[in-house]
Image (cartoon, rainbow, N blue to C red):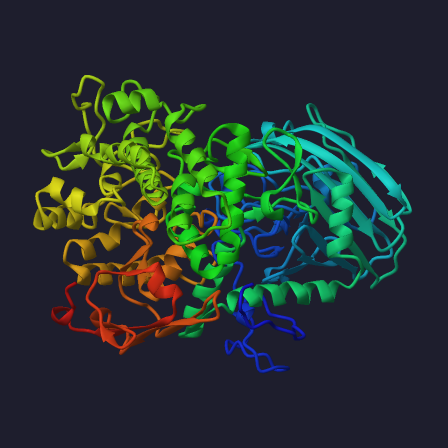
Amino acid sequence: MYTMKFFAHTIIALAAGVSASCSGVLSSADSTDYASFVDPFIGAADNGHTFPGACRPFGMVQTSPVTGAIGWRYCSEYVYSDSIIWGFSQTHLNGTGCMDLGDILVMPSTGQRLRSWDAYRSPFNKKTEEASPGYYAVTLSAPDVRAELTATTRAAMHRYTYINSDSASLLIDLQHGPAWSESQYHAQVRECEVQWLDNQTIAGSVRNAVWVNQRYFFVMQFNRPVTDTLSLPMLERERGKRIVATFDMQPGDTLLMKVALSTTGIPGAKANLAAEIPGWDFDYTRTAARDEWNSYLGRIEVQGTCEEKTNFYTAYYHAIIQPNIISDTDGSYRNAADSVVAAPGGEFYSTFSLWDTYRAAHPFYTIATPEKVDGFVNSLVAQSEVQGFLPIWALWGGETYTMIGNHAVPVIAEAYRKGFCGFDADKAFNAIKRTQTVPHPQKSDWDNYVRYGYFPTDLTPAESVSSTLESTYDDYAAAEMASLLGRTDDEKIFRERAAFYKNLFDKETKFMRPKLADGSWKTPFDPSGVSHAESTGGDYTEGNAWQYTWHVQHDIPGLIELFGGNRPFIEKLDSVFSVQLVTSQSDVTGLIGQYAHGNEPSHHVTYLYVLAGQPWRTQELIREVFDRFYRPEPDGLSGNDDCGQMSAWYMFSAMGFYPVDPVSAKYILGAPQMPGFTLHLANGKTFTIKAQNLSREAIYVESVTLDGEPYTLPYITHEDITKGGSLVFRMTSDKSKSYRQ
């Protein structure tokens, strides 16, 4: 059980985003209201792709406003600059570059019931919009309705106050969901069934296909009887029903709605609703949501300015929105084979954006939410047993086949290295071995990989260089876990494969570049050419040779050796930050030269200076990234938050270290960006971090002590942190005094 301060208090209403006071101290109790520092609007402008709605940590439901649903800009269904709300849907993806979910859109209305589904949209005044953990509110101008949303893990609760109207209706749109095109929007629902259980309860199921094949069941209840219903006509190729329910209400009356989801069936949705929102107390549910958020956010106490705390706690908030539990309260869920089964350990999680999150988000969970880690691993392994390989990008219990590599492998290996033992290690390794050796659909041509020692560009449809480099990291992770399990033969095989990255290094150009099956380099070669398999093809994934040449997270000394030593390595690394990149690729943003902080392959690169003997340069770059690419504004993120990975980089770097190689259980030291941190650990101990003399000018680390003793290693271990203690950085403005590990 996680040792933690729990909160019991009454939550006061907040102004939009963050409370007016940044003290974070509740007036009714001597406790810190960490949720008051969270601004859910951060990242909600354009390519951050976050949403401002209400949810619980790791919850199935994320109920949030919809301001658009067509095209990449609307992956989260919300853009801060929009002025029209379509309605409120019950599930959302956080910060992704692909779209799905957006299930069950509802929209209050007044006046004459209209037969056009898109006529129910309403303008709104931004000044009426509020968002905080577990709560969202806005006043809809057209119907003059105050809409409020809150949530539990598997259910949402809505409160609609019809301010000046003597008629009240609610649109229930089961066709809705974000889509890449207008055509897809009207064709994504394959099956839809609804039934009124009584005059206050509707239930049903929907099967759709946008990114993943999804099937969900729901139960929706109202606190007032429905007096009449109208079914709107379907457009061509539509299967999702749209129903307008009418209620007998007077001006100022309130309509309450609660809706629960399940992957298993209507009985599962009923049970979820009964367990999580048995009554009609909206304020109680809202307060409970905030209490739960505080119980997580309070695990890390931060010292800093109001702006710094807002950035940090919002990052924390975004990081633990997912992975999402999709099992019912009884532990059952629908698996990738479309069968209802019992979840291992009683909980099943999905929404694993593994190409992004293995880098820092999952390492963050091992420190901040360790009680979830075994459940994550058990879920990954359980899905692999159904589909034959570990998930690549898992959503709603299914596989999307998105991105490259198979980074469930390092997530599992990291957990085992760090001592997590709530899963069958042998079963988990068998899943790793099968994933890394048995070819599986679309992604893993292991025969060519092993035969040539890389993915030949002429035998690989796209992304040959990136796929090779990311697969070598997975092989390294497999070797590390095999070593811990004493499987020496397996370790030898995967250790050899982990060195395949060397086969794509061109010593003449000093880039990782595409190679043909005959061993010759592909020409012509433009190291600045950005590619993406799903849009432009090419040999790199959302990046180029400048960015991917450093993608050897597991063997930086070996990479330095390929360059010929620290000096040429640093000279090339310097060029990354000085050679300008011009690109319109939506995933390659947050640029410092060729470095792209808006996308994950660059995230560890600033820390490589530490391992090449120039930690001061890492310290400079971290400060630049903080100043430029993490602003507490709706457009403050430089790229998609990607299910918390962008946020996890911020939190680790703020604390002064980062997991360049997560499987090693080591964190490379950088420079803290805030004065102090107290980590409340699962074993009841604390780990404190202090940055003495930190200022706008004092960005360099002069010395480090661990538990009062001088510390000269370039990293700190996971064990160092979890056993409790004190890490102190002495900061200076004099670069010449920056210490050398």
Q: Where is residue 549 in the image (x, y as percent from the top left)?
A: 22, 39
> Residue 597, how many percent across, how many down?
33, 50
From the viewer's side, name the closer residue of 462 and 474. 474
The answer to whether residue 370 is visible is yes
Which residue is painted at 22% across and 18% down in the image? 517
Q: Is residue 37 left or right of residue 572?
A: right
Position in image of residue 442 (x %, y %): 43, 24
| Left or right side of 32 for 719 | left
Indicate the quadrant where residue 464 lies. Answer: top left
Residue beneath the point at 67% across and 39% down: 263
Give whichever of 282, 496 is nearer the camera.
Answer: 496
- When the figure is inspected, residue 318 is found, relative to residue 463, above or below; the finding is below
Total numbered labels placed on residues in the image: 0
Residue 525 falls in image quadrant: top left
Looking at the figure, which quarter contains the N terminus?
Answer: bottom right
Q: Is residue 253 or residue 119 the one in the foreground? A: 253
* Residue lying at 30% horizontally and 36% vertically, measured from the top left: 488
Give coordinates of residue 60: x percent, y percent.
62, 48
Is there any visible trace of residue 113 in the rendered image? no
Locate the C terminus by quadrant. bottom left
